[in-house]
């Protein structure tokens, strides 16, 4: 019971702080994965939902949407769907963070001799893994409805890498959201209010050309539009954004990188700051 | 005492907005002792524990655990302490064993040491059978035990237990008490908060009574109880008996003021318990010609302690404390 029953071989204190950080991140990431294994329905956000959206847009709305410059709507859709499916895991992240914060578990973590940044980092890594599943589901259902890639493997890898970078940046925004809200319900609601316009006032599902003049610049500068355009370009799919003059439409890949790194630079330190000062 | 105290607090102050949760709390807890913080909801018990466990920063004063400052040397303090809060700090979706191994790994144990220690604690706390079940299937008592096991996995030398038995049924509470006694035998220093006088009485070597964020009385349980009149004799008088005569006859036994309830013909007498007390009370009343239809002896309650020590009932303090607790929640 007492410290005397511990031998030096039982402790990992000899490790450096980076090794300690990685150890803690790994232990906590495993915790989140174990949760998914026990309750696979928590994955519905990245499995069932994207399938429903793809089928609905492909077969219900798609026929009514004209693509400037021409092209197949089914091929157009997948670039936008990738962004939506990854970014919308952020409210889920917020809900998970609020839930952890509202139980005593976080107090326990904060009273342990562990890395403070590890709790949040582990959360985002577990969510990045769900996003990988989400991307695979979108690609799979895309292939089933006739989406095809017309470029090389390098471009495809780049597209998925960009999408995941983009999704990862949103995950940190979700962590911040979870840190400032009080209940899982509030996180769910707020997430919905933020992500619905973010997704739909963009070129994710419809080209910006059909929107009213005052709305077009908003949609064009929406990071979701940049990701959709970058993916379409890299997949060799119809990309009406190429006909738009705005800078992010013309430099879609660079815009995605700027948006993602910018969000990471703001939200990751903010999240850690909020966590450190929570309730102090 | 030349040895460094396990816990020392000097003039701890903590505000939540305008509410003062702690108002100059002083505390000294010796090594390998059990110290009880006794007080009603919102007296500042939880705030004190959260400061000592490095979760909260005090607005004033200082505190040390095993000689290390809880603010300046928080990282060192965290290697020494274990914390069991009021709400089970467990992952509902993990099994009991996975929870313990996780906390062990985060307490800097190797996987092998964490697993060995987890199995040892599961066995000891009667949870071996349930080890591979998800925590959400556990009963309240099992959760508390697992939570306590989690706070022990890193071999802490100082353990904080915040209301370890609140909300538990009597048998689960008795089991917790047994476990706590074993810990003490192992040489762990224990700071436990409780709203129940009998719990502090059963477990603690010394008790500090807290009200309004300050220690208002401190001492061994026996000394404290004696100071407020440890027991209460409750008498129901027969129809014909005169209450005034009865009060007069009871005066020599009273350790405080006798509280008469004329309508119900009830008398409440604070006493210091001795063998044969009830018999002597009845004999004295009989000699005075007072007839008794019912007699009961009960232990002094927290309310009694409060009434005596503070001059106000615990309920009044409760309201203030609800405010403090609301403020605390808002701050969290």
Image (cartoon, helix red, strand yellow):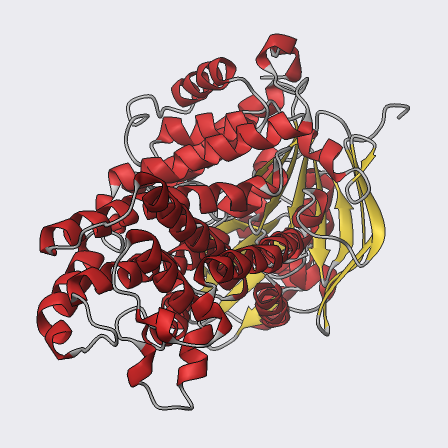
Which quadrant is the N terminus of chain A positioned in? top right
In the rendered image, is residue B287 in sight? no
- Would residue A275 appear left or right of A188 to someone viewing this image? right
Q: Nearer the viewer, residue A218 or A2?
A: A218
Q: Position of residue B186 (x, y in %)?
A: 61, 18
**Would you place residue B51 above or below residue A215 in this image?**
above
**Would you place residue B61 above or below residue B20 in this image?**
above
Q: Position of residue A66 (x, y in %)?
A: 19, 78
Residue occupying the point 22% across, 58% down: A50
Residue occupying the point 10% across, 56% down: A145
Q: Nearer the viewer, residue A51 or A101?
A: A51
- Would residue A2 appear left or right of B100 to someone viewing this image? right
In the rendered image, is residue B127 in sight? yes
* Quadrant housing residue B99: top left
Q: Nearer the viewer, residue B245 or B110?
A: B110
Q: Position of residue B274 (x, y in %)?
A: 62, 39
Q: Position of residue B42 (x, y in %)?
A: 62, 61
**Would you place residue A1 above or below residue A47 in this image?**
above
Residue occupying the point 19% across, 67% down: A71
Residue occupying the point 51% across, 14% down: B113
């Amino acid at each position: 019971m007492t410290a005397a029953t511990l031998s030096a071989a039982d402790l990992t204190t000899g490790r450096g702080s980076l090794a300690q950080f990685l150890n803690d991140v790994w232990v906590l990431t495993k915790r989140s994965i174990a949760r998914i294994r026990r309750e696979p329905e928590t994955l519905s956000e990245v499995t069932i939902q994207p399938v429903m959206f793809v089928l609905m847009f492909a077969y219900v709305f798609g026929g009514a949407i004209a693509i400037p410059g021409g092209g197949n709507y089914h091929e157009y859709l997948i670039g936008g769907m990738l962004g939506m499916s990854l970014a919308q895991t952020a409210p889920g992240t917020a809900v998970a963070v609020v839930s952890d914060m509202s139980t005593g578990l976080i107090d326990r973590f904060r009273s342990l001799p562990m890395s403070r940044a590890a709790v949040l980092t582990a959360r985002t890594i577990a969510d990045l893994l769900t996003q990988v599943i989400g991307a695979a589901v979108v690609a799979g259902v895309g292939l089933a409805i006739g989406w095809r890639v017309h470029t090389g493997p390098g471009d495809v890898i780049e597209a998925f890498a960009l999408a995941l970078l983009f999704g990862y940046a949103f995950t940190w925004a979700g962590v911040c959201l979870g840190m400032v809200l009080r209940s899982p319900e509030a996180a769910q609601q707020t997430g919905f209010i933020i992500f619905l316009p973010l997704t739909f006032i963009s070129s994710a599902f419809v080209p910006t050309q059909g929107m009213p003049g005052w709305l077009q610049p908003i949609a064009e500068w929406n990071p979701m539009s940049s990701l959709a355009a970058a993916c379409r370009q890299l997949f060799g799919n119809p990309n009406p954004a190429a006909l738009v003059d705005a800078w992010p439409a013309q430099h879609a890949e660079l815009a995605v990188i700027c948006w993602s790194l910018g969000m990471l630079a703001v939200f990751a330190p903010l999240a850690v700051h909020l966590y450190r000062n929570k309730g102090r | 005492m030349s040895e460094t105290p396990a816990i020392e607090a000097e003039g701890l102050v903590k505000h939540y907005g305008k509410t003062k949760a702690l108002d100059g709390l002083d505390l000294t807890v010796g090594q390998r002792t059990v110290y009880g913080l006794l007080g009603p909801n919102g007296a500042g018990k939880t705030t004190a524990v959260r400061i000592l466990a490095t979760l909260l920063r005090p607005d004033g004063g200082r505190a040390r655990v095993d000689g290390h400052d809880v603010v300046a040397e928080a990282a060192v303090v965290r290697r020494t302490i274990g914390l069991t809060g009021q709400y089970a700090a467990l992952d509902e979706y993990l099994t009991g064993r996975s929870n313990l191994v996780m906390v062990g790994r985060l307490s800097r144990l190797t996987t092998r040491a964490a697993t060995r220690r987890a199995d040892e604690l599961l066995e000891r706390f009667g949870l071996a059978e349930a080890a591979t079940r998800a925590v959400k299937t556990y009963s309240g008592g099992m959760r508390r035990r697992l939570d306590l096991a989690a706070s022990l996995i890193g071999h802490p030398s100082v353990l904080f237990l915040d209301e370890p038995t609140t909300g538990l049924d009597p048998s689960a509470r008795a089991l917790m008490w047994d476990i706590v006694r074993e810990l003490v035998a192992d040489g762990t220093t224990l700071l436990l908060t409780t709203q129940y006088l009998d719990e502090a009485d059963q477990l603690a070597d010394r008790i500090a009574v807290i009200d309004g964020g300050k220690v208002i009385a401190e001492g061994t349980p026996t000394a404290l109880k004696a100071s407020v009149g440890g027991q209460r004799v409750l008498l129901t008088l027969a129809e014909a008996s005169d209450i005034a005569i009865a009060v007069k006859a009871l005066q020599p036994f009273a350790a405080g003021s006798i509280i008469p309830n004329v309508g119900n013909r009830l008398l409440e007498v604070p006493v210091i318990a001795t063998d044969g007390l009830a018999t002597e009370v009845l004999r004295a009343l009989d000699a005075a010609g007072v007839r008794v239809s019912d007699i009961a002896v009960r232990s002094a309650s927290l309310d009694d302690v409060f009434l005596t020590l503070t001059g106000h009932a615990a309920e009044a303090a409760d309201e203030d404390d609800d405010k403090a607790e609301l403020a605390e929640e808002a701050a969290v």
